[in-house]
């Protein structure tokens, strides 16, 4: 039984050594996790101003984009106004031309007919 006691003592010593090393490694893991936690907190504190400045930058870009769109919209409206006015002028010109051409062509036809009548009258009057 002496060998059995020796193995039992060796087993207890091994278990004790294993427990001691386990405590040592758990302590190291805990300290490493604590360091990582501290690093993450520091990183978070450094990232917060970066996020704030990025948000401000995004807002400024949005404002600049909005301000840049406004003149473009105004120019489009001015172009539409000019196009509408040109169309109105062209329509007026067309109506004016039609309003003048019809009576003017009738007048010219009448004057041409009168002229032909007078010429014919003089031609026949001279023959007699």
Image (cartoon, helix red, strand yellow):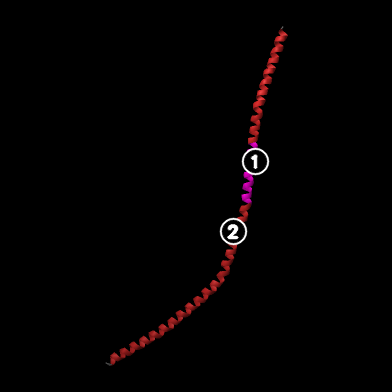
Q: Position of residue 124 (x, y in %)?
A: 70, 10
- Label 2 SS: helix
Q: Position of residue 117 (x, y in %)?
A: 68, 15
Instruction: Please name the residue shown 63% across and 48% down the image.
Output: 75
| Image disc number at residue 67 | none
Name the residue located 64 percent from the left edge and 30 percent from the top edge: 98
| Mark in the foreground, 2 or 1 | 1
Instruction: Examine the rendered structure and indicate whether residue 36 appears above or below residue 7.
Output: above
Figure check: 27 above or below 73: below
Q: Quadrant of the C terminus?
A: top right
Q: Which residues are magenta?
A: 71-90
Residue 120, located in which quarter of the rendered image? top right
* Residue positioned most to the top: 128
* Residue ID for mark 1: 85
Q: Quadrant of residue 94?
A: top right
Residue extending furthest left? 1
Q: Residue at x 66, y 29 (%)?
A: 100
Magenta region, main secondary structure: helix
């Amino acid at each position: 039984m002496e060998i059995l006691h020796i193995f039992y003592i060796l087993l207890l010593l091994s278990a004790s050594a294993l427990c001691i090393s386990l405590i040592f490694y758990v302590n190291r893991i805990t300290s490493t996790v604590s360091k990582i936690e501290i690093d993450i907190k520091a990183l978070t504190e450094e990232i917060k101003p970066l996020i704030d400045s990025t948000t401000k930058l995004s807002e400024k870009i949005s404002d600049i984009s909005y301000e840049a769109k406004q003149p473009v919209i105004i120019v489009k409206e001015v172009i539409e106004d000019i196009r509408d006015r040109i169309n109105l002028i062209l329509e007026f010109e067309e109506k004016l031309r039609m309003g003048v051409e019809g009576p003017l062509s009738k007048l010219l036809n009448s004057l041409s007919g009168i002229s032909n009548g007078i010429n014919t009258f003089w031609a026949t009057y001279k023959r007699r």
